Image (spheres, rainbow, N blue to C red):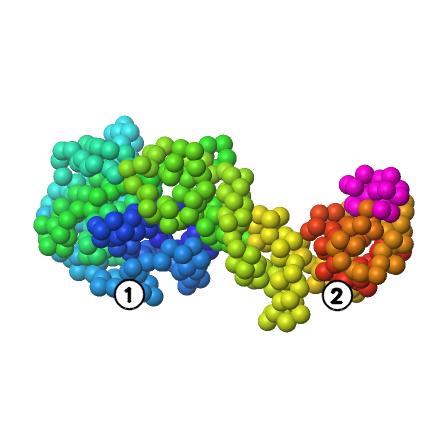
Amino acid sequence: MAPSPTGSPHVGLVRTALYNWAFARHHQRHGAGGTFVFRIEDTDKERNTEESYAALIELMHWLGLEWDEGPEVGGPFAPYRQSERSDYYVETLDRLRASSYTYDCYCTNAEVEERRKASGSKVMGYDGFCRELTQDQVEEFEAADRRPVVRFRMPDGTITWNDLVRGEISFETQFVPDFALCRANGDPLYTLVNPVDDAMMEITHVLRGEDLLSSTPRQIALYEALKDLGVAKATPEFGHLPYVMGEGNKKLSKRDPEAHALAYRDQGFLPEGLLNYLALLGWAIAADRDVFSVEEMVDAFEIGDVNPNPARFDLKKCEAINASHMRLLSLDDMTHRVLPHLKAAGVVHDPVSDSDAQLLELAMPLISERINKLSEAPAMLGFLFVDEDSFELDEADAAKLLDEQGKDVVRASLAALEGLATWSTAAIQEALQGALVDGMGLKPRVAFGAVRVAVTGKRISPPLFESMELLGRERSLGRLRRALG
């Protein structure tokens, strides 16, 4: 995974990590071995910050995609951050440069483009101008202080591999230009460091995005050279995963708000819900089933079942899948997961006081079937925990439901409730039903809407009668009186 300059990794990258993780775990579980390797591709100095690195680690831990080798864990091929592996790249580049597999190229991009236009060629990329330079030409370039890049010499012929997702794929190498392995200042490029790391870490399978498919023939050719030089033992098998599309059937861009993976945590999604939905962007556990656990995915996942066609990201379906996972949580688990959101919103104290904990235990059953994301809990429960001096009515809801007719309803409710001997859900319901539905002839939706706004501050809240019992007699009656002005 490469650090993201936006600070939040792309959901497409999460989908790729998930498929790799499920692939490794499936093979582990079924006795064929399987090691999930997490490597940080941070050689791009502009993108690489400690904040972006921390965001990757934080995301993977939140998702529960724990790794067998990588940062924090270590492993036999450490280190697992490319920024700490530069010696390996320099050594390998020197060995390649001393071989016939590469050559020094002194051309500028402008010169390459000028030659392409002059020839009328439509083939983009390098034209091989420096492949067979004479010693005089080399000396002339060096006398002009030209600093060369090292280019890999693509072999003649056809490169074919059996893609784990797409089947057999072939590239004619005449259409695959010789590629640079480093910058003119000597810094290694992705085209070198990625295959070198795969070779040295003995990676057997690589599942990655479709956007990297065109680079695969280059890497396969480089693996052949690395095997010849004794750096690599074998060429990995590749599987290229379908694009994740956004609106208008365009590739989901990092600029699209739906693309930012960590935002889903902040918005109250469950990691189980997000992973379940991302799994569906190219794979299915069954034709008639959308909701499943990651453990069920591990059991069923076969890379050959991945659909190679692009998959469109549908936020509404993602939210629906998350809601289904919310329903699967135990009450204790949901309460535990809701707490950080309640603390962040200032609904409960941090650390949680005994009184807040007791009230939350009683209140959670009222909303556990009503919230679809963890972040919805503060808005639903805030009225129970707020100090009376800080309690406020939603202006729009109050304007709509606490008009003169609404205030008549509140007056009738107040009169019916003030004399209650027992302040319980059943007694409150009976009193309000009698005063508003039977006494005033109102429909329940009209009857209780004004009371709900007066007591909870909003027209959407947990069940009214249970909420009033938890709120208590004095606070409930006080809010009804305040609504009357």
Point out the tag, 2 or 1, that comes first from the N-terminus.
1
User: Measuring 37% from the left and 50% from the top, which residue is drawn there?
Assistant: 295
433 left or right, relative to 377: right
Viewer-side label of 2, 1: 2
Q: Does any portion of residue 168 appear in the rendered image?
A: yes
Q: Which residues are magenta?
A: 434-450
Quadrant, the C terminus:
bottom right
247 left or right, relative to 399: left
393 left or right, relative to 250: right
- Mark 2: amino acid: Asp
Q: For residue 358, what is the image quadrant?
A: bottom right
User: Measuring 89% from the left and 51% from the top, which residue is drawn there?
Assistant: 411
Q: Residues within 10 Å of mark 2 (few under 14, many from 20)?
A: few
Q: Which mark is residue 387?
A: 2
Dominant SS of magenta comes to: helix
Residue 471 to residue 125: above or below: below
Alpha-carbon distance for marks 2 and 1? Answer: 50 Å
